Amino acid sequence: MKEAATTTLLALDAHGGDYGPDVTLPAALDALELEPRLELALVGLPEAISEAAKVDHPRLRLIEADSVLAGDARPVAILRQGAGSSLGRAMELVAQGNVQGCVSAGSTVALMALAVKQLGPLRGIHRPALMSAIPSADGSTSVLDLGANLNVDARQLVQFAIMGSVVRETDERSMPRIGLLNVGHEETKGRTVVREAHERLRELPLNYVGFIEGHDIFAGRVEVAVCDGFSGNLLLKSSEGLARMLFEELRASLNSSPRARLGGWLARPALQDMLARLDPGKHNGAPLLGLRGVVVKSHGNADRAAMVHAILEAVNEARRQVPGRIEARIEQYEAGESN
Amino acid sequence: MKEAATTTLLALDAHGGDYGPDVTLPAALDALELEPRLELALVGLPEAISEAAKVDHPRLRLIEADSVLAGDARPVAILRQGAGSSLGRAMELVAQGNVQGCVSAGSTVALMALAVKQLGPLRGIHRPALMSAIPSADGSTSVLDLGANLNVDARQLVQFAIMGSVVRETDERSMPRIGLLNVGHEETKGRTVVREAHERLRELPLNYVGFIEGHDIFAGRVEVAVCDGFSGNLLLKSSEGLARMLFEELRASLNSSPRARLGGWLARPALQDMLARLDPGKHNGAPLLGLRGVVVKSHGNADRAAMVHAILEAVNEARRQVPGRIEARIEQYEAGESN
């Protein structure tokens, strides 16, 4: 518990996302309330900063930015205009070592582009990966990559597994179960690159359970599910879409007759418990892994509570020094491999 | 309506799948009842055939097979032992022109291997694709490929789109909406092969709506969603797993207190309507497209009603002469392309 005794410093992009400071400022204050040893640097446009100054919280630093990146900005524009933006300034604080990490609801493209440019990848990491936790029967399963790497080689898939394992370790002895997504559980199935990664993963001191299929994610068979970014992105977005459709169908069916409405009213507390348990906001906060600093992406439409979760994810990763651990683990495992 | 006036002949593999003749025979009789101009050839082991002979249905022909392929048989074993198996004999009937198509609950690997060997692909088709319809807000969306082609090139993705369009056309004038699954809607996003297919699809006289994302499948934005088999397989299996988890959560929450139980009891008719609407059995029957004959795969665990759906899918494709239409369309579109 030595880690908890020191202060954690994080930067928070006040803008990016759908609601900006209306969500980020209250969420920042909530997080500071929950975490007495946290300091936040809120980075925003002058008007957002002067609004935040009225609060005058002793652990909330305020940093002005010149601009805000558009949600649909292209990489070229991001790299050209990024430096003075709220996200760019937040990354700068990480790069200069003033804070340990940053949180933003900006676009994945913007976070990735500026993180790679301003922080750079860890030693041994070719490209960072985006990971997100999704609700499962057993709690949650973290899936990576979710779109940062559309085409991957076997070495990258192995690195995803190592990085995911580090993030999901809750203490020194925990061994998160890692699975490699494939089209079947059998060894002979799947793409060459996936079978190659499978062979390498079996040699490493990870809790690697082998190939898994899509349904294993939700059955809670693993803590970490590894795949290329194209598949991961489809999987995440289709799951969101399916869940939304099913909840809408449920709502409609509980409104389809007076009897169903009465039933729905009686069942409401139980159904609300269920929704709370499955609430994706509870898992908001997707780390970009493999960078020289903690970077956590929030959903663009995160509300106050969801944004607090994203901040706490960054707090947790910063305290556990996830970037340093990943670098050490990659070095150790890849050195062992080449023997 | 001229097509409906002639008799449709199909072969049905009595085995394969989890229940064998206990499901296939009653399903065959149901389908014959529903379709007065259908004739079925039930292909099975002698004991299944003598059981079926007791029914003595005038439109149910009985064909003996020597063996049944194991559900987990590998391609080599399938090709070696396939000929005398119930699935192999069913395919043989198609290959010899005795029937227009066949239906089996056997493994995808077995269906694909024997279909390619015994029927062969249509002219111009490199590899067949597996397509399945999944429930959406608007009815259903057909997704292909679902695992027959783990790595694809742009030409294959275009062929998937053409084949999917032919299957979903309900009459001569209907133009099913086709989408290409990608990591974003923007033209600049995604893998090279997907962007290349996008450029070609825009030139063809299809109702091509452009890139779609995972959630668009369930929002009912398209009738046909095209992707490589690796992604499609993950998408299908993860959707099944998520739906199962959510229904189990719903059941548990409606059992969590006396009040919730009463609510659940009152809402039950409405919830059952919802489940019936979303029942994947209603969409059972996944065609293997691009072959010289209709081949429809049933889920291994299909019950009687689901098996009937698979048979009716094959009836529909045989009546509409889907294989011939696909061949003509591929020829026409690819000729136009090379101009």
Image: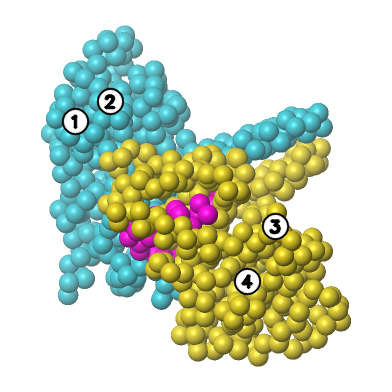
Chain colours: A yellow, B cyan
Q: Which residue in the structure is indicated by mark 2? A: B70
Q: Secondary structure at mark 3?
A: helix
Which mark is first along the chain, 1 or 2?
2
Q: A222 or B264, which lies in front?
A: A222
Q: B57 or B28, which lies in front?
A: B28
Q: Secondary structure at mark 4?
A: loop
Q: Which residue in the structure is indicated by mark 1? A: B77
Left or right position of B282 against A285 = left
Determine the CA span between mark 1 and mark 3.
Answer: 60 Å
Determine the CA span between mark 2 and mark 4.
Answer: 56 Å
- Mark 2 crowdedness (10 Å alpha carbons): few <14, some 14-19, many ≥20: some
Q: Is residue B148 visible?
A: yes
Determine the CA span between mark 4 and mark 1.
Answer: 57 Å
Q: State whether residue A124 is above or below residue B315.
A: below
Image coords of residue B1 (percent x, y): 33, 44
Q: Chain of mark 4?
A: A
Left or right position of A18 against B210 = right
Q: Chain of mark 1?
A: B
Residue type beneath disc 2: Ala
Residue type beneath disc 3: Lys
Q: Which residue in the structure is indicated by mark 3? A: A2
- Kindly indicate whether the residues beneath marks 2 and 4 are on one polypeptide chain: no
What's the magenta region? A141-166
Residue type beneath disc 1: Ala
Assess whether mark 3 and mark 1 are in contact (beta carbons under 8 angstroms).
no
Q: State whether residue A297 is above or below residue A207.
A: below
Assess whether mark 1 and mark 2 are in contact (beta carbons under 8 angstroms).
yes
Image coords of residue A225 (percent x, y): 47, 49
Count of labels shown? Answer: 4
Determine the CA span between mark 3 and mark 4.
Answer: 17 Å
Q: Is residue A160 magenta?
A: yes
Assess whether mark 1 and mark 4 are in contact (beta carbons under 8 angstroms).
no
